[in-house]
Image: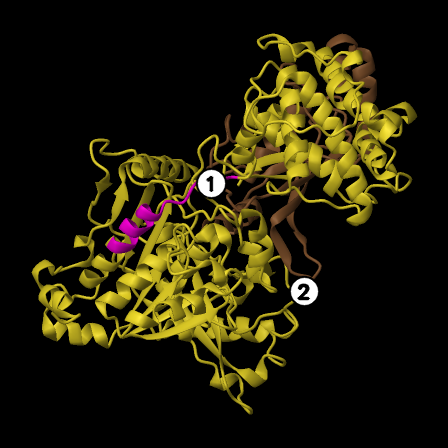
Amino acid sequence: MSSLCLQRLQEERKKWRKDHPFGFFAKPTKKADGTMNLQKWQAGIPGKEGTIWHEGVYPLTIEYPDEYPSKPPKVKLPAGFYHPNVYPSGTICLSILNEEQDWRPAITLKQICLGIQDLLDTPNPNSPAQEPAWRAFSKNKAEYERKVALQAKQYAK
Amino acid sequence: MSRDSNITKIIGAENLKKLRSTKCLLIGAGGIGSELLKDLIMMEFGEIHIVDLDTIDLSNLNRQFLFRQRDIKQPKSSTAVKAVQGFNNSKLVPYEGNIMDTTQFPLHWFGSFDIIFNALDNLAARRYVNKMSQFLSIPLLESGTSGFDGYMQPIIPGETECFDCTKKETPKTFPVCTIRSTPSQPIHCIVWAKNFLFSQLFTADVSADDDSESKDWGTTDKDEIKRIKQETNELQELQKIILSGDNTLIPKILEKIFIHDIEKLLKIENLWKNRIRPTPLKDNQTVVDLNDKNLDLSIVWSIHDQIQKFSSITNKLMKRMKNEDNHIEFDKDDEDTLEFVATAANIRSQIFNIPMKSVFDIKQIAGNIIPAIATTNAIIAGLSALVSLRVLHLLNYAQISKPVELNMAFTAKASNMSHNRYLTNRTLAKPNCKCPVCQKVVRGVMQIPTNIFSTLKLNDIINILSEKYNFDTEELAILDTTGQRLLSDFDFDSLDDKTLEEIHIKAGSVLLVTDETEDDNGMGLKPLELYIDDIEMNNGTADDIKLPEIKIPLVKMTTSEEENNESSSVETAVIQTNEVISLDIDEEDNNADSKKRKLSDAASNVETKKSKTEADNVSIIEEDDIIELN
């Protein structure tokens, strides 16, 4: 890992400590040897109040590549997560996480987490990542909302 | 005419005497290294120590002129030394090892040299040596080539920009959607075939993800779980076919990946609003015989031949799996794996209306081959040797009053500048004030008696450092930069009671120590980077620990978002006007590399191999969903 990556990740931890949105959490994971791995974090994203997502806190893993912050972190929800813009593997399709689209080195963890919270209730029908949720979202809202609510219960706070 | 009459004419008898007592380190005895070794010997450097971890390969011989066929498999460093004995007057010391191995090459060993020449082929080692030169303030001559391009850059620590002052180009990545759903170039299909399909079928661990009962599926809906399982299991199903060895099932593989998967994609209408829809294979196209046909690798085959070859190669690989522990790695020189990837990529290309390529072309792309050119190496090595005379103040007619008057050199293509000439040689820049390596930290060496590594606790280190540098113990973050491990910070103290030995801090570890306290103006102490060295002692105590005598300056701590933005735009500007890093790629070694170069300890974690890549010259690795060209 480059020095830039390491220093930046340390700064991300510090920034998060100083200021993070209510109901969210994020911290580095532990390695087998008991030390903390700054390149792999776990986070929790609460669904927005007043949406069908609000009951859940959704677990994220955030992996920072060695080339971070030139390259974006890889952010995943659990495999099989039901959302039109989430791949079956859990990988999230979000433009700010895509190097060729809107990723900029200045984007912080807080912005990523808020971006994903936003995405939960405002899926982008133009970049489908899985068929079932995308299909239900475009063609059968009732079914979509039922499944989302069920999933929210699964990840209840 | 005596042998040294030329160098005497150039630098004078007195300076030649100085040169003859100069001790230099040459890292790398490959393409540039062979050339440099010859140059340094002809210039009569007093001592030349040569480090290389590699052995000689057939493919090296076209340009690494010190080696012959009989030397294949011999270590490069010692073979190079033997080869030059006939014309050598310098003291030569070869080492076989990885320069990042702190046991073989501790910091104080680096400290014994007057100047360092880099003739490396990978970014991790370049960064590492750069850092060592910064720790010790030893001048470094950095160089690299890629095909007809190359660069040479003197680095005078503290005075001129260091290797990490400019952003280095990183391998290209493709968004996962492009690879999985919407390829538009041959490379996308090759990445898919090599990193996704091939690795899933022949390399992936079979037993993974089998515990469906305990798995968190993110839903309790039975149908939903079934669907997810199906989706995640489909590729495992294919792998099971491979493992079953039943070649009558091969058409099933074709059907799944070239018909059913494509049909599924077609159902997602939005993908095809602005794109040409793919055309899956037809049912009758998947029934083919499994006889291996000999086809010309340099031409593009018909789609029928692609499918036929795909089937016969899959059959072949299926049989090999049995004898190879159910694990085959892609290797561009393993014809079966290459042809599997080539045909799979081509069939997919055909489906997505992308031009197909010959196996030969795909080998270039998938194998990341950039031809190394002997002449480029000779030019760059020559410039490096020449400028070293100025760095060492031995060239009286071209004396410099300050290091920024030195020149670097790079080819037009590597810089996108001066298209009307091959080489550009601008003077050196000052260090970039935002450089994470040479500007954002203060450096020093912490010496610890050998006998107390097993008793000294992390907490003791925290206290000793805090006392010496006035840190706030509560706010101190300690990172082991070699293993990228956070050892302690405000919210993490469970290791504070462990001894250095227990947390694997040893001589050669580099700790980054940051006091996160900020005053009202956002000012705080600059982070401190400490190289841990040991002092040979039997009865040393904590009192024998030696810390660098430095005053740590106050700096602005958090970069605000605007500054981050600004710095990113500055970096981009630098890349555009300045340099693109290009490295000497060893064509045959890329695949073996990672194996060969792995260190047993943490240094292997930072081992990556990068190159300046053009769209077509890439080797490819994938980790799960992010596809990355390395």
Please name the residue that numbered disc 1 is placed on: B170
Residue drawn where x is 19% and y is 48% of the image: B427
User: In this view of the protein, can residue B21 be seen by the observer?
Assistant: yes
Frontmost of labels 2 and 1 is 1
Of residues B382 and A144, the one drawn nearer to the viewer in this rendering: B382
Q: Which three-letter amino acid code belongs to the residue tagged 1? A: Thr
CA–CA distance in space, label 2 to label 1: 36 Å
Q: Residues within 10 Å of mark 1 (few under 14, many from 20)?
A: many
Name chain B's colour: yellow
Span highlighted in magenta in the image: B368-382
| Secondary structure state at the residue bearing disc 1 | loop
Whether residue B370 is in magenta: the answer is: yes
Name chain A's colour: brown
Residue B393 coordinates in the image, percent (x, y): 16, 66
Q: Is residue B428 above or below residue B261?
A: below
Of residues B324 and B288, the one drawn nearer to the viewer in this rendering: B288
Whether residue A110 is in magenta: the answer is: no
Residue A138 coordinates in the image, percent (x, y): 73, 10
| Count of numbered tags | 2
Provide the major secondary structure of the magenta segment.
helix
Q: Which three-letter amino acid code belongs to the residue tagged 2? A: Ser
Q: Is residue A97 above or below residue B527?
A: above
| Secondary structure state at the residue bearing disc 2 | loop
Residue drawn where x is 38% and y is 61% of the image: B66
Q: Which mark is residue B494?
A: 2
Q: Residues within 10 Å of mark 2 (few under 14, many from 20)?
A: few
